[in-house]
Image (tube, helix red, strand yellow):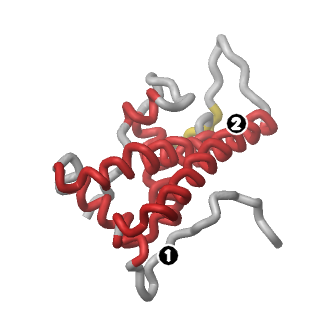
């Protein structure tokens, strides 16, 4: 089964620094990656699958699923928009073609330094963490409305209750 994305191109372009002229094929996989890694990390497997199934079956807009639509629109979509940018920004200026790996360069612009790219990624991560904290706070008071949030078993992903990325520990 194909992955039902929690946001679409319009959601991302209207609510991010990604320009509307960017080809969808350049960033769509980063939405999927961010969704599978970050969103599932905070929702847990069962709630993630529930929302994914509602979207795939076209049932997310049903009145009976209003609480899931609210959760998606208010908390998960903003988190995903910024998480997708965290993953996309480092790759945005590169392309792999038959001749090798290329870096895009425009005649009327200048390329940014690695430090500037890292800064953009850090800012996007800060916004993602903000929306993650909002989601965690909401779920701590409303988890009884979403039984899938606490029903994970065995090798399912259990929800993460910490919204901060503290770097890598070696």
- Residue 106 to residue 64: above or below: above
Q: Which mark is residue 158?
A: 1
How busy is the neighbourhood of tag 2: few (under 14 within 10 Å), some, or many (20 plus)? some
Extreme-top residue of the structure: 108
Residue at image point 75% right, 60% down:
166
Left or right side of 76 for 166? right
**Where does residue 43 sit, x and y in percent of width and height?**
45, 64
The residue identified by callout 2 is: 120
Left or right side of 61 for 116? right
Residue at image point 51% right, 64% down:
140
Left or right side of 157 for 17? right
Quadrant of res 65: bottom left
How busy is the neighbourhood of tag 1: few (under 14 within 10 Å), some, or many (20 plus)? many
Does residue 149 appear in the picture of this structure?
A: yes
Left or right side of 21 for 85? right
Extreme-bottom residue of the structure: 154
């Amino acid at each position: 089964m194909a992955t039902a994305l929690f946001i679409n191109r319009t959601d991302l372009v209207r609510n991010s620094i990604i320009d509307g002229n960017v080809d969808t094929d350049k960033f769509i996989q980063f939405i999927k990656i961010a969704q599978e890694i970050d969103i599932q990390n905070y929702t847990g497997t069962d709630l993630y699958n529930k929302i994914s199934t509602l979207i795939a079956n076209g049932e997310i807009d049903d009145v009976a699923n209003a609480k899931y639509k609210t959760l998606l629109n208010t908390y998960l979509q903003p988190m995903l928009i910024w998480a997708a940018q965290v993953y996309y920004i480092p790759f945005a200026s590169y392309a792999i073609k038959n001749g090798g790996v290329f870096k895009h360069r425009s005649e009327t612009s200048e390329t940014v330094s690695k430090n500037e790219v890292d800064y953009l990624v850090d800012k996007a991560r800060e916004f993602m963490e903000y929306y993650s904290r909002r989601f965690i706070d909401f779920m701590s008071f409303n988890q009884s409305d979403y039984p899938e949030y606490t029903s994970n078993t065995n090798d399912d992903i259990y929800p993460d209750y910490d919204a901060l990325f503290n770097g890598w520990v070696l």
